[in-house]
Amino acid sequence: MFKPFVPSDFEVPERLETDKFRLRMLKVTDVVKDYDAVMTSVDHLQGIFGPRSKWPTKDLTFEQDLIDLGWHQKEYQTRSSFAYTVMDLDESRCLGCMYIFHPTKEEFDAEVYMWVRENARDLDILLYETVRKWILEKWPFKRVAYPGRGISWDEWNRLK
């Protein structure tokens, strides 16, 4: 039987805002800014989802990115995963993304991945620390994995 990712009565946080950035649900209407962030940072983003990940590729099309964003938006609406865009405070530029996924390893409740565009790399550590605190304080997960950050890819790949 399918186990819900979050309890049905859990109120999913809509946003997280700091003095440097805002996280909010990633939507298809973000595609122009998201595509710019990804395509200007392809080499910088390689390996975000693991050393074997092919995302993003230099031939990623605008339409493919739109499909990805639609998929993320639908999963958010069905509460099966949660994708947030990381925007600057005036919403003029996508700085990156953050994803909360069902765990693929038995010992975790959730997996969290995040990235920042190349010319916002100075925000990477702040984003990571802010998201860790937010997940701990506002989300129902007890054992959260941050592959490639809180756990090395080698160690992650050895887990079942």
Image (cartoon, grey):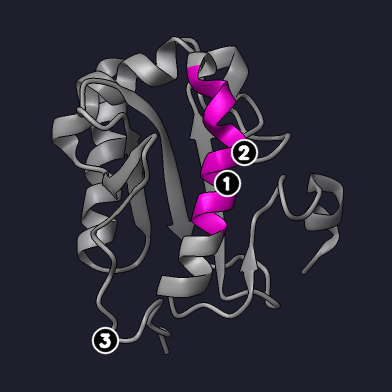
Front residue (pair 80, 124): 124
What amino acid type should be assigned to the residue bearing mark 1?
Tyr
72 up-or-down from 10: above or below:
above
What amino acid type should be assigned to the residue bearing mark 3?
Ser
Q: Which mark is residue 8?
A: 3
Q: Please state, as top left, top right, bottom left or bottom right, where the C terminus lies in the image.
A: bottom right
Q: Residue 42: x and y, percent?
A: 53, 15
Residue depicted at x 50% and y 54%? 131
44 up-or-down from 19: above or below:
above
Q: In whole angstroms, how far apart are the C-alphas of marks 1 and 3?
A: 27 Å
What amino acid type should be assigned to the residue bearing mark 2?
Ile
Q: Residue 86: x and y, percent?
A: 36, 37
Q: How many labels does the image show?
A: 3
106 up-or-down from 29: above or below:
below
Q: Which mark is residue 125?
A: 2
State if disc 2 and disc 1 touch (CB < 8 Å). Answer: yes
Within 10 Å of the Cα at label 1, are there few (<14), some (14-19), or many (20+) other Cα atoms? some
Q: Is mark 3 on a helix, strand or loop?
A: loop
Give the magenta-colored segment's residue range: 120-132
